[in-house]
Image (cartoon, coloured by chain):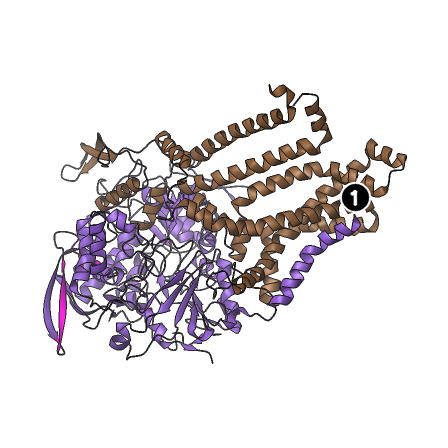
Amino acid sequence: MLKQHPTARFILQRAGWYLLTFLVAVTINFFLPRLGTSNPVDIILAKSTGGLSAQAAREKEESYLKEFGLVKLDGHGNILRDTTIRMAKVWDASKQVSVSKPDTLIKPIKASSLDQFFTYVKMSLSGDLGTSFQKYPKKVLDVIVQAVPWTIALQLPTIVFGWIVGNVLGALAAYRRGLFDRVFFPVALLVSSIPFFVFGMLLVYYFAVVLGWFPAMGGYADEIIPSFSFELFGSVAYHYVLPFFSIFLILAGGQAIGMRSMGIYELGTDYIKYAKWLGIKESRVLIYLFRNAMLPQLTGLALSLGTMIGGALITEMIFSYPGLGMAMLSAIQNNDYPMIQGVTLIITTCVLIANFTVDIMIGFLDPRVKAGLQMGGN
Amino acid sequence: MRVTKMSVLGLPVALSALLLTGCKGHRHSSGTDEFPRDQTLYLAGSQWGDPTSFNPLAESWQAAWPVGDRFNLMYEPLLSYNSLTGQVEPDLGTLVSKDNDSIVVDINPAAKWSDGKPVTSDDVKFVFDLGRRYKDAATAFAVEFISKIDVKTVDVKGAKTERLSFLVDKKGRDNPLVILDLLQAIRIVPAHVFEPLIASNNNDLGAVKKLKIDSAPVVSGPYTLAHYSNEKIVLERRDDYWGNAALHDGKLPAPKYIIHPIFKSNDAFAIALQKGDLDASQTFIPRIWQKFKDGVGTWDVAAPYYVPGAIPLLVINTTKAPLNDRNFRRAMAAAINYADIKELAVSGYANDIKSGLILPFGQEGKYFDEAEAAKHAVKPGIESAKKILADAGYKAVFKADGSLDHTTDKAGNRLPTLSIKSPAGWSDWEAMVNIAVKAMRDAGIDVREGFVDAGLYWPAKPSGDFDILMDKPAAAVTPSLPWSRFEATMSSRNWAPVGGDNKMNENQGRYNSPKSKDYNPKVDSLLKVIPITTDSVALKKAYTELNDIFLDDQPAIPLVYLPEQFYEFSTSSWTNWPTSKDPYAPPLLPWVGASTKILWQLKPVE
């Protein structure tokens, strides 16, 4: 039936693949943090049980395991236990020999990863991403909702502006060559190869510490209580400048280099030569060039837009800027399963949506794909 | 086409120009109408990450500043310990007497909750009894130490006063020292608020611990929560605080507001302090003397700049060969260049290290016997280390370029490369480990750095999953030092072998196994007897004996002395911080224990 609608068929087919990728990714995101030997309760306990007797420490551990859903429970909410008896060597001081003595171990039965997985799927489907262990009793969703606006506000403009400015400059350099290119190219190369953290720290040192023009850190001034006010908006904008440039310049430089080499490559192709030979206006040729050179850049843009939600960790750390990056880092460091799952779920979804959109867009923009569709292929 | 390009290019430039002109002259430190700079104190370093709960019944790691830990601003303890003078100072209570049977405290008759109700023995008993009622109470560990709290009413200077006797649990831990710790560590909460809360949650403490208690909390302290977000926590002064009249001659604390910004990296503290955006902090800032010109100060203007209080050390897993050989451990201790660690790793913020687990000065100095320690300590130096190794039959095999290839044992078998586990990114610890490793390798000990994520470091500690581990036991300065440092390093009280789910919350190196034939019962008996020894001569003798055993057996290697907090302040907005010239409070942020009184002494800069 879909044979008559190649475009719909193409979209549905792509969507199917993306759904499959999504399921695989979510499953991997779930099991990956659980492959290690340490569990989050061990980390919390090690920080909080100093001075406790063995018995008290065990009781505390069990209460955490129960709280975080990591043990099996009976119908009444009591922890199921497993008793093992093993022989242990003990030194008998009176006889001066080692003797074997039975040692009884009663341990709670841990919930298997598979049990946890089903709970997770059930909860996720009802929109509950669970409670963070490390930020207990905060809900994972609350952490994400509070941090994501900052992350998007920081990343979206930098990525979009960086992409546009970089590509325009790159295309210009490729087309113009000459002095412009000879100055521009090494500068872009230099800027794009500075690590984010070095560049960020240089900005802080020079513009915040030495000149004092901009604040060194934070998303807004410490003396402001957030509310919808002009004061807050002004402070946010003021605090935005350095973090923005710390990403923007490096990103634009990288994009420009990519676009420049794509442009130079396209300039040598037959269709450009043919177009020039036909005497088509220069601006028209430039459009042809730009459209074709842009395709791989577009895929790159989609990827950066998709992954941006994960946060700009380095920028957040240098500027103590609000966002999801730090939450993700500390979640990983502390094996905070629900937090890792929640954030990776959001990242996965965004990457896939962005990629899907670009896939579809390229289907319309790339004449080769379009031609293939019209011929009934995929 | 070209016009479009230029406009796109011009946009960010225009945007930044706009922001630049629009905001010029807006100095951060000028303050706002809401938080005038001369009434607002900016302090940081006690809250990392999003504040999630202000519940005083929550575990200390869950509750945000200033509710968890030993912070005195909202909820207060009965007593405060002054680590400079060694005195126990009054707070909600006043210490009356302490002996091996009980610790007696009078409740301050003036003490009141913010809702006007008096602080009574019911509140104190409620907190301490929670541990008896609920195993998951944060105060559950107190049960092992206190058998009962007796209450009677007495007349003190004409005022009816409730007198509490915390009876030492003689059958339990029999340790009055720790009870003294607990009385300044456990914050009293209003029973008349929390008891009904527990009842309305079907007596489920777990459900109550989940509550955030973040709006209009009933507190007894000088400040209360005004606002919080992921970026900061704001406290506002309570002008009707009972302690203003009872403890501070009727004065109010100088700052009306305290703002604790939440930073994400260590560098932020130094920059903010230097710019005057922060008034005090507690992070490690290298070469602090270079910041003095910017109005940054610390306890002392000359080395060591800080007051030492804790000893970071290498915990050795004594169950593993060759680490189970004390000669090998002593050789490691001999090899390390302690002067390098002091100068290079911690910017010289320490006095020269002497042997053992007792700080040779300050409150612990009276327990330290230098001559005796020198007799038992290993002779430091690379040559000394090499000699100890050779005498014990170990051989180091060096490469042609002089670097170590491997080490062999008495039988000529190649020893495995040992690793020092330490959290990645803790820069001062990393530097200590690097210096220790270099020196040990020079001496012929095959050891390497093992920097791991904090998520691997913490669980490895109690389970004994390490060769050598960086640690700082008993990091807070409390009345029970140096006993608590020895206990954390040498006690076999909760002995559990390495492996499986076994965990030890002290002596993670598994030194002195009670199940082995080499067990030295003297260690545990000294640890048991020191807390109930009152005679000062006998006490020094017991500590000396314990320190001698530590030096003989070397179950751990102390590396350097560090302050309890890296106390730093800026004088750009507030002055009169305590320093060695004016030591009116211990060098801690003004919410920890006896240092809280700093708030009443600060003066805004005109």
Q: The purple chain is which one?
A: B
Q: Which amino acid does label 1 sit on?
A: Ala
Residue A224 in percent (x, y) is at 48, 64
Depth order, front residue of A144/B278: A144
Q: Which span of residues is magenta-colored?
A: B156-179
Relative to B411, residue B562 above or below: below
Regarding residue B523, the answer to whether it shows in the image is no
Q: In which quarter of the image is residue B588?
A: bottom left
Depth order, front residue of A210/B247: B247
**Mark 1, residue position:** A174
Depth order, front residue of B304/A155: A155
- The colour with which the image depicts chain A is brown
Residue A361 in percent (x, y) is at 65, 35
Taking the image as shown, residue A269 lies to the left or right of residue A58, namely right
Residue A335 in percent (x, y) is at 41, 42
Relative to B179, residue A87 above or below: above
Residue B96 in percent (x, y) is at 16, 70
Chain of residue at mark 1: A
Asked if residue B32 is among those painted magenta in the image, a careful observer would answer no
The secondary structure type at the circle numbered 1 is helix
Q: Which residue is rendered at x = 39% and y = 32% of the image?
A: A117
Q: Tag 1: Cα neighbours inside 10 Å, few (<14), some, or many (≥20)? A: many
Relative to B599, residue B101 above or below: above
Taking the image as shown, residue B570 lies to the left or right of residue B133, namely right
Regarding residue A317, the answer to whether it shows in the image is yes
Instruction: Report the number of discs.
Output: 1
Depth order, front residue of B208/B520: B208
